[in-house]
Image (cartoon, rainbow, N blue to C red):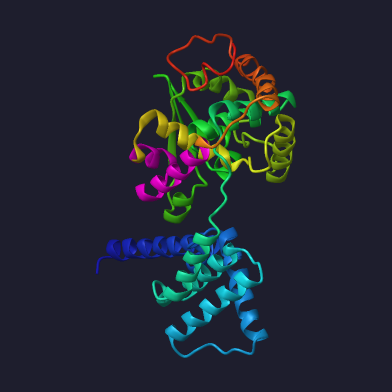
Amino acid sequence: MPAESRSRIGRDTVRSRMLVQQRRQSRSALGSLRDRQVSQATLVRYREAVAQFFDWMEAHGLAVPDTTVGFDNMLASYAECLWQEGESRALLASALCGLTLEVRSLHGRLKAAWHMHATWLKLEPSRRAPPLTPRLAQAFAGGFLLRGDVRTAGMIMLGFHCLMRNCEFMKLRIMDISIFPGGQGQLRLLHTKIGQRLGITEQVSVTDPWILEWLPAYTRAFPHTGCCMQLTDGQFRRTWSQIRAELGLPVAFTPYGIRRGGATHFFQECGSFSLVSDRGRWSTERATRIYVTSALQDLAALSLTGPEADRMAAALCHLRPRLERMTPQAAKRGRSTFDVLVPA
């Protein structure tokens, strides 16, 4: 073999070894494949629930059955025990999901246990936060502005418009916001459910004319690499609770209503479950249909009059002037979701 060929093979071997070493170091930081199937927080919750199930087995002197059917029946008995003892349905769901995650052969074979879970859901339907209307979303944003927190106020407006989960707008960075010359914006979402599951970065467009008026100045006003919000999750929720009390709203109004209200309002505008599913980044249109339908039912039962409406109007008065103060001109490019709700 010529010396030049041997030299090239040697260089390729060294390069290959370096690549292997780099991949090894990178994957070591990422962790095992098994542990990366779900988020770290979800993994911790699943394992704690599974541990509680095995503690229950030990307390009752039970051994792991030899068959899947026997194991399924034991989990059904565990579900009955949780029901009788007043435990949360989420504990059962986490245990079942955790067991399936650890032992993939159990997938689709725990029929009795999941049937118990479905029966539990029928008897005790999930109590979701009421969806926020555009006016309510603005009222909460106005409450944060009254406290001098323009960062969080802006994120509430963006969260409502872009159908964002709490973790998505709380972890959004200034550098994840792009404004294009054509009069449209885009957000890069690094912490979505589907994105983390598939290892991709999802995006959502910003099209509301009013938001696009102040958003460019918003992105220039704060450090490029930092998060848009400076509050921790606990601080955000505590301040939210204070504003909710000031508005005279029930405890049921939680930050979860931002995404729920945004999805409901968007459906009322477009009338398409498919469009809502795409914009809200749901995995299936069926899930979107269930989500929006239940929210519409809750919205129909929502009625705010008297003192609550007066307090809300007072909070709204602080919103538009404070946000638009960041931009010298406020020429309207089209109809905004929020135009008719807040006096300029």
Query: Residue 309, how many percent across, how many down?
Result: 65, 24
Predominant secondary structure, magenta span: helix
Query: Residue 2, how many percent across, how many down?
Result: 25, 66
Query: Residue 278, how many percent across, how many down?
Result: 37, 40
Residue 142 is drawn in which quadrant?
top right
Query: Residue 229, how many percent across, how many down?
Result: 65, 35
Q: Give the answer, above or below, for where 136 lies relative to 274.
A: above
Query: Which residues lie in the magenta part?
Result: 274-299
Magenta segment includes 294: yes
Q: In the rendered image, which quarter contains the C terminus?
A: top right
Q: Give the answer, above or below, for where 135 lies relative to 93.
A: above
Q: Give the answer, above or below, for where 48 lies relative to 174.
A: below
- Residue occupying image coordinates x 58% and y 64%: 89
- Residue occupying image coordinates x 39% and y 38%: 276
Residue 304 is drawn in which quadrant?
top right
Residue 74 seen in the current view: yes
Left or right: 36 as drawn, with respect to 9: right
Left or right: 283 as drawn, with respect to 62: left
- Residue occupying image coordinates x 66% and y 17%: 317
